[in-house]
């Protein structure tokens, strides 16, 4: 199926309150334009340089999400335009985002990435660390950055029960934290292989790449 058919099929399948972020990393601008011409506007990348290059060339009304790990010294390149940063994992990074957002006279929305997978390779912080950040005086002083939710990646496994457990854990963490912090409204979980499970577990934002654009070639 074509990119536009894939997009339409996924949008028909998911509930209307679930936002679809089309993950276009490694894919050429023509592919993004095909999805754009099918009416899609939200795209995600995992490298700041690649996202910035695409932002410069593609239509202005695209909403760009950074879903990859963020190095502090690169925040400045995306600060003029990024809509949502999914994988924030420290107060230091929030401070830098705040600083760069202020320079651009805007406010930037972020999600805290919680580590829910078993593998040690995945980034993210513990629930205790997330609470410490949200409750800290230093965080409350930041005026140009907003934490609007949580993000997590489940273990890459065929064991559906394990994936379900990890997503359910993140959903209950989200419910708990959002009681005290009403700004938290976005729960970003679910990729091509597991977004159906993620939605059943309460996700309201899915990040889908290969099911839309096809397999990635990293060479
Ligand atoms: C690449 C990527 C995705 C999309 O992965 P697919 O399996 O291709 O859907 C989602 N989230 C993050 C953080 C990614 O890096």
Image: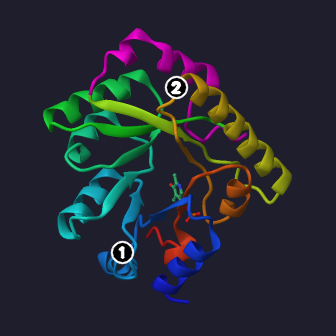
Q: Left or right of 88: which side holds 81?
A: left
Say what secondary structure mark 2 lies in: loop
* Above or below for 142 versus 70: above
Q: In the image, which disc is placed on residue 181? A: 2
Residue 50 quadrant: bottom left
Question: Could you say which is closer to the camera, residue 134 or residue 73?
Answer: 134
Q: In the image, which disc is placed on residue 67? A: none
Say what secondary structure mark 1 lies in: helix
Q: Left or right of 126: which side holds 56?
A: left
20 in the magenta segment: no
Q: Residue furthest top?
A: 137
Question: Could you say which is closer to the camera, residue 87 or residue 188?
Answer: 188
* Above or below for 89 versus 138: below
User: In the rendered structure, which segment of residues is drawn in magenta?
Assistant: 117-143
Residue 72 quadrant: top left
Tell me what residue is drawn at x 73 percent, y 37 percent: 169
Is mark 2 in CB contact (under 8 Å) with mark 1? no
* Between discs 2 and 1, the one toward the N terminus: 1
According to the picture, the residue beneath numbered tag 1 turns out to be 32
Tell me what residue is drawn at x 58 percent, y 80 percent: 9
Q: Mark 1: few, some, or many residues within 10 Å (few <14, many ≥20)? A: many
Q: How far from the left and from the top, in percent, is residue 190?
A: 62, 56
138 in the magenta segment: yes
Tell me what residue is drawn at x 24 percent, y 62 percent: 55
Q: How far from the left and from the top, in percent, is residue 40?
A: 40, 72
Residue 197 in view of the camera: yes
Tell me what residue is drawn at x 37 percent, y 22 percent: 92
């Amino acid at each position: 199926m074509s990119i536009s058919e894939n997009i339409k099929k996924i949008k028909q399948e998911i509930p209307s309150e679930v936002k679809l972020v089309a993950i276009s990393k490694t894919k050429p601008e023509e592919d993004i334009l095909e999805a754009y011409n099918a009416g899609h506007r939200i795209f995600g990348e995992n490298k700041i340089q690649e996202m910035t290059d695409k932002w410069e060339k593609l239509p202005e009304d695209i909403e760009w999400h950074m879903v990859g790990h963020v190095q502090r010294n690169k925040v400045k390149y995306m600060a003029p335009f990024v809509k949502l940063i999914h994988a924030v994992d420290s107060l230091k990074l929030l401070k830098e985002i705040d600083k760069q957002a202020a320079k651009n006279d805007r406010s930037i929305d972020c999600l805290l990435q919680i580590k829910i997978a078993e593998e040690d390779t995945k980034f993210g912080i513990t629930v205790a660390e997330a609470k410490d950040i949200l409750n800290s005086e230093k965080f409350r002083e930041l005026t140009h950055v907003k934490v609007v939710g949580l993000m997590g990646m489940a273990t890459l496994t065929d064991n559906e029960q394990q994936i379900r457990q990890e997503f359910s854990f993140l959903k209950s963490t989200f419910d708990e934290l959002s009681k005290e912090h009403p700004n938290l409204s976005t729960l970003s979980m679910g990729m091509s292989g597991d977004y159906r499970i993620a939605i059943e577990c309460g996700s309201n934002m899915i990040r889908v790449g290969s099911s839309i654009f096809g397999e990635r070639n990293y060479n």
